[in-house]
Image (spheres, rainbow, N blue to C red):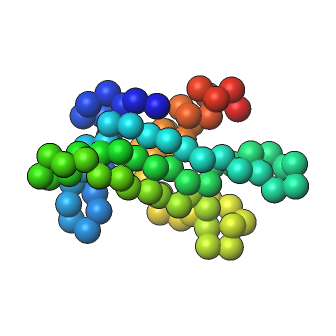
Amino acid sequence: MHLRPGTLTLTQNGQVFEAYRAQVKFASVEEGPRTAEKAKFSAKGPDGESVGLAVDLLSEADDGARAGVPAAIWKVVALAATAAGD
C-alpha cells in the first residue's frame, strides 16, 4: 500500500527514513489464523535515495508477536489486513 508522505518515519542505526510504500506478508500454520509475519517498506533515506527496510513481526520462536515493534508499524499491519479483507 502507498503511504502518504510524512506519515511514517522509520529510524535504523540513527538514520531517519521516510516510508512511502508498505507491504505486509501474512502466513498461517496448518490452516490456523493468518498472522503478520513481515513488513517491508520502501523509503527515502537521508540522502534522498530509495531504500528497502524490513521488519520481522514474529518472535524468534515464531510463537507470537516480536517484542519492541513500534505501534506505528502495527497500525500499518492493521491497515494492510483490513485492505486484504482479513
Asked whether residue 9 is in view, the answer is no
Q: Quadrant of residue 30?
A: bottom right
Residue 3, horizontal then vertical, whole percent: 37, 31
Residue 74, horizontal then vertical, whole percent: 51, 45
Query: In the picture shown, does residue 60 fall above or below 18?
Result: below
Residue 63, horizontal then vertical, whole percent: 72, 66
The residue sitting at the bottom extreme is 61
Q: Quadrant of residue 77?
A: top right
Image quadrant where one finds the C terminus: top right
Q: What residue appears at the point 47 percent right and 63 percent down from the top-left corner?
A: 68
Q: Quadrant of residue 84?
A: top right
Q: Is residue 13 left or right of residue 41?
A: left
Query: In the picture shown, does residue 83 fall above or below 11?
Result: above
The residue sitting at the right extreme is 30
Q: Nearer the viewer, residue 19 or 48?
A: 48
Q: What residue appears at the point 38 percent right and 37 percent down from the top-left corner?
A: 21
Q: Is residue 18 left or right of residue 55?
A: left
Q: Is residue 13 left or right of residue 79?
A: left
Asked whether residue 27 is in view, the answer is yes
Residue 47, horizontal then vertical, whole percent: 12, 52
Q: What residue appears at the point 69 percent right and 67 percent down from the top-left corner?
A: 62
Query: In the picture shown, does residue 1 fall above or below 30?
Result: above
Q: Nearer the viewer, residue 24 or 7?
A: 24
Total numbered circles: 0
